[in-house]
Image (tube, grey):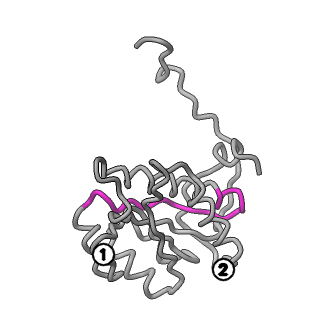
């Protein structure tokens, strides 16, 4: 699939089949996440791949109501910021690096025919703390988001045109 087509057909998937995802596809998705731009190439992220169904259920509870899709997902990827890799003068750039990595993984999943939904964690401090404790993350690791991944129960690859001309300004407001 071409990149622009993956962007135009990507939709959040919240209901998945029981089909698993191969290690090869998991690695492709993670590689896509690691291939995005990163502030000064600091690569301020780390990932936890969760395949254990019981742990996915607990992660769903820890991250709140909207994380329910994790319960039916083939796997989840917890995207975290690594504060030890952060820039001393601008440590908050880890949030941008984690966001770029997550977006790349969503698009890679779409390209592979795998559904996904991006579940926010950061900056909700209660979610961050719950997930951090559940996953026994080191002090320097901050949960950013969680991807629920699996094959969609109802695949839909219809292209959408989401361009809104009234939101675009050229040369001046």
Identify the disc placed on residue 20. Answer: 2
Numbered label attached to residue 14 = none
Please identify, in this view, whether the residue under mark 2 or under mark 1 is nearer the observer. Answer: 1
Which residue is under mark 1?
132
* Residue placed most toward the observer, 70 or 87: 87
- Residue at disc 1, secondary structure: helix
Left or right: 38 as drawn, with respect to 135: right
Residue sitting at x 45%, y 70%: 78
Is residue 25 shown above or below 101?
A: below
In the rendered picture of this protein, how many numbered marks are placed on residues?
A: 2
Is residue 123 a member of the stretch shown in magenta? yes
Name the spot of residue 157 as percent of width and height, x first.
70, 51
In the image, 150 versus 158, the foreground residue is: 150
Label 2 and label 1: CA atoms lie apart by 26 Å
Q: Quadrant of the C terminus?
A: top left
Question: Is 96 inside the magenta-drawn segment?
Answer: no
Q: Specify few, some or many for label 1: CA neighbours under 10 Å numbering under 14, 14-19, or 20 or more.
A: some
Above or below residue 38? Residue 146 is below
Say whether residue 124 is left or right of residue 87: left
Residue farthest left in this picture: 126
Identified at 64% across, 72% down, the residue is: 26
Residue 147 location in percent, x, y? 50, 65
Magenta residues span 108-124
Q: What percent of the width, then of the height, locates residue 55? A: 43, 85
Query: Which secondary structure, mark 2?
Result: loop
Task: State left or right for residue 11 relative to residue 24.
Answer: left
Characterize the local packing of mark 2: few (<14), some (14-19) or many (20 or more) Cα atoms within 10 angstroms: few
Residue at (54% x, 82% y) in the render = 51
Viewer-closest of 37 and 106: 37
Q: Earlier in the sequence, mark 2 or mark 1?
A: 2
Left or right for 22, reference 139: right
């Amino acid at each position: 699939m071409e990149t622009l087509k993956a962007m135009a057909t990507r939709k959040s998937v919240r209901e998945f089949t029981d089909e698993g995802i191969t290690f090869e596809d998991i690695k492709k998705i993670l590689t896509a996440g690691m291939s995005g731009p990163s502030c000064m190439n600091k690569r301020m992220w780390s990932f936890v791949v969760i395949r254990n169904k019981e742990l996915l259920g607990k992660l769903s509870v820890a991250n709140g109501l909207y994380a329910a899709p994790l319960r039916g997902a083939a796997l989840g990827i917890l995207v975290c910021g690594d504060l030890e890799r952060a820039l001393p003068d601008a440590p908050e750039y880890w949030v941008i690096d984690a966001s770029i990595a997550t977006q790349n993984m969503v698009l890679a999943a779409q390209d592979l025919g795998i559904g996904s939904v991006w579940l926010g964690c950061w900056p909700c401090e209660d979610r961050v703390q719950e997930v951090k404790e559940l996953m026994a993350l080191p002090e320097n690791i901050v949960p950013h988001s969680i991807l629920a991944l699996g094959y969609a129960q109802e695949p839909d690859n219809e292209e959408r045109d989401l361009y809104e001309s009234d939101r675009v300004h050229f040369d001046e407001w």
